[in-house]
Amino acid sequence: MALPANVSTTLLRNVPLFAGLDEAHLGVLAHMILRNRFARGQTIISAGDTTDSLYIVISGRLKVLMRDEQGREVILAILGSGEFFGEMGLLDDSPRSASVLTLEPCELLSISKVDFKRCLAENSDLSLTVMRGLVKRLREADQKIGSLALMDVYGRVARLLLQLAEDVNGEKVVVKKVSKQDIAKMIGASREMVSRVMKDLELGGYIEVRGRSIVLRDNILLAE
């Protein structure tokens, strides 16, 4: 649901995408942006839709996925606070290439295609940030293709856990719970194989499960 236009420049300044803009530009931007809240399990955009807006994640997590004609899914990415999506279609005027669904309650900002293109034309820092985001996704896609071709399932699971981990008191920890089914869809394996690999990694001392979190040991690099 879209909320009234009550986006502050303070909020925008804390969004990495807009961090390089001055106060005047942030003030103009605040009047263009809508603030939205979505429940868990909602579809934000669907593959094939007309591209009309850019979305920025304020809180919550979402998954970017593609489905084939049989309904099988491949998860391309999991997005969190500060990340954005929907920019590719705004730049090349193509339909949405993937779907985005919420994994938990989310708060998003959205800006229309017309306003976003005007902002890009007027702000070189914003254009550079968007380009860096596109390059980052291209590199991640290259890594995923490489791991699918060159790594076994153990290596793919280990690499994904490292990508999802955060630094917590000197330890690498996967704080946000990711289901084994979603892990399987991200690395191109079956859920049963992922369960077996996770159990082996735990028994081998590569990971430690603490409640909903997974602590990665230094030797997990050996499992890649």
Image: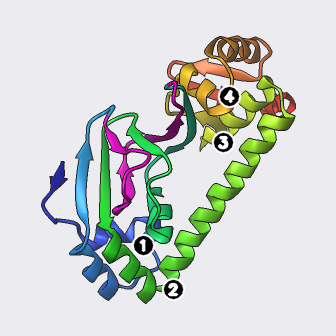
Residues at badges 2 and 3 in contact (C-beta under 8 Å)?
A: no
Amino acid beneath label 1: Phe
Can the viewer see residue 147 in this picture? yes
Amino acid beneath label 3: Gln
Rendered location of residue 208, percent (x, y): 66, 20
In terms of sequence position, does the residue under pointer 2 or pointer 3 come before the other? 2
**Mark 3 to mark 4 CA distance (whole Å):** 16 Å
Residue drawn at point x = 50 percent, y = 69 percent: 92
Residues 7 and 169: in front is 7
Rendered location of residue 145, percent (x, y): 75, 43
* Position above or below: 6 against 76: below
Which disc number belongs to residue 163? Answer: 3
Tell me the mark number nearer the camera, choosing from 3 and 4.
4
**Mark 1 to mark 4 CA distance (whole Å):** 35 Å
Amino acid beneath label 4: Gly
Q: Quadrant of residue 165?
A: top right
In terms of sequence position, does the residue under pointer 3 or pointer 4 come before the other? 3
**Residue with the mark numbered 1:** 18
Which quarter of the image is occupied by the C terminus?
top right
Residues 197 and 167: in front is 197
**Residue with the mark numbered 2:** 124
Q: Which residues are magenta?
A: 42-70
In the visual, does 15 lie left or right of 105? right
Is residue 57 highlighted in magenta? yes
Q: Secondary structure at mark 1?
A: helix
Can the viewer see residue 165 in this picture? no
**Residue with the mark numbered 4:** 188
* Position above or below: 41 against 24: above
Residue drawn at point x = 36 percent, y = 34 percent: 104
